[in-house]
Image: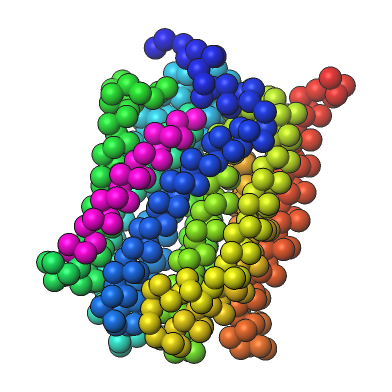
Amino acid sequence: MQSISKEDKRIFILSREKPAKAVVKLGVPLIFGMFIMVLYNLVDTYFIGLMNDDYRLAAVNLAYPVMMITVAVSNTVGAGASSLIARSLGAGEEDRAEQTLTTGFVLTGISSLIVTAGGLVFLPQIVRGLGAKSNTFGYTSEYVSVLLIGSLLTMGSYTVGALLRSEGSVKLSVAGMIAGTAANIALDPLFIFAFGMGIRGAAVATVLGNGISLGVSLFFYLSGRTLLRPRRRFIRPAWAVVKEIFSVGIPAALETLLTSAAYIVNNNLAVDYGELTVAAMGVSQKIMSLGSYIYQGFASGTQPIMGYNYGAKNYRRMLSVLRAGVLVVSITELAVMTAYGILAPQLIGIFSDTEEVVTLGARVLRTLMCILPFVGATSMCRMSFQAMGKPGYAFAITLIRQLFLYVPLLLLLDHIFAFSGMLWAQPVTEVIMMTVSVALLYRTIRREAQTADPAGQ
């Protein structure tokens, strides 16, 4: 293959652009794209809310961990391959980057078939494990079954988007997100109301939207608009590449699975306060996803910069990007937190007319919003470790955050302070984790720099 020009704009942003500008240039398009993806959940919630059945609304929330688990499995390939691609480009190993890209496509197809088959076999057990009760079991089963059948489209959409971002082609990745969400918005009322499919129709629209997103992303690869392309000679995966992908990807997937498990624990505790409480929490958490996607966008935008410069051994730039990224994401999330605090009842009221749901939802939103100034820095550190090919550190952050802090605090504070305690478990967790994560990443980069250049030159 021809060598990639060092003057390519995407390479310039990764290697030489001012740190704050680089974070913004790669992060803002992703935030916009992720905001568009928030509509996947909000649109389903909105149209199902029009059916005036809060049990259907609760069922969509109960089914959400299945989507998260599907994404977690795709993240095994997406995160692992993206990390290796960015590091290979930074080291000038372009052939290895294309081999990794091709292997990522093959592994995504195989893993999606496993998810579909296994999920459908154990569907009743999965739905019960999600916390569905008599009033929500049937609706949750309908929604989850469609998500499982469409795993290939959903997983492909997430993985290919991540592969595009790894080479700095953020705008192409966002274009796929926009196309898929636009399709979902158009198809939701068609399948839910016109075809009379109800909650199953919402799931079908979501899956088809992901399929269109995947199709657009594949078009960019096939039309030559990307830096890298999948190559036929790499279709048979090399063991060394597969091993490297999974060494980063499996811990990344476990992180998402742990988050999903914590989400399920949260829902099961909430059910004890009534199924309408689950609906209220579901709506507020989906609104919170806007703030979540902002910090995830900046973190995902930072990831290829960190990976590229780690491969190039440019540790000074990595420290500059870390400082700039934490500052940018914290200031942005403070603004979002302020807006949530002022508009909480109105935002919840968009999705439900039930007074209890609106009141509880506003209370939940005004508590959960307190995580926003802190959680972005943690996410940025975790994804930077993935980019550096240090999955153990990334997984340790999530393990401490979810298993050793959040879930124990969730159970303890719920026991002591009931519903209020359950809500405040996450803000307390995020304050602690921001301090731990930033200190760990900063020390790791400094240690790598000293090892590479003991004289400090």
Could you tell me which quadrant the N terminus lies in? Answer: top left
Residue 329 place in picture, x, y as percent: 64, 49
**x 63%, y 33%: residue:** 21
Residue 187 part of the magenta segment: yes
Q: Which residues are magenta?
A: 168-191
Residue 173 part of the magenta segment: yes
Q: Nearer the viewer, residue 32 or 455?
A: 32
- Left/right placement of residue 389 relative to residue 202 reads right
Do we see residue 20 in this rendering?
A: yes
**x 49%, y 61%: residue:** 289
Residue situated furthest left in the rendering: 195
Vertical position of residue 195 compared to residue 327: above or below: below
Residue 98, quarter of picture: top left
Residue 305 place in picture, x, y as percent: 59, 32
Residue situated furthest right in the rendering: 455
Could you tell me which quadrant the C terminus lies in? Answer: top right
Residue 240 place in picture, x, y as percent: 47, 30
Vertical position of residue 22 compared to residue 248: above or below: above
Do we see residue 234 in this rendering?
A: no
Q: Nearer the viewer, residue 123 or 13?
A: 13
- Left/right placement of residue 223 relative to residue 29 reads left
**x 32%, y 82%: residue:** 55
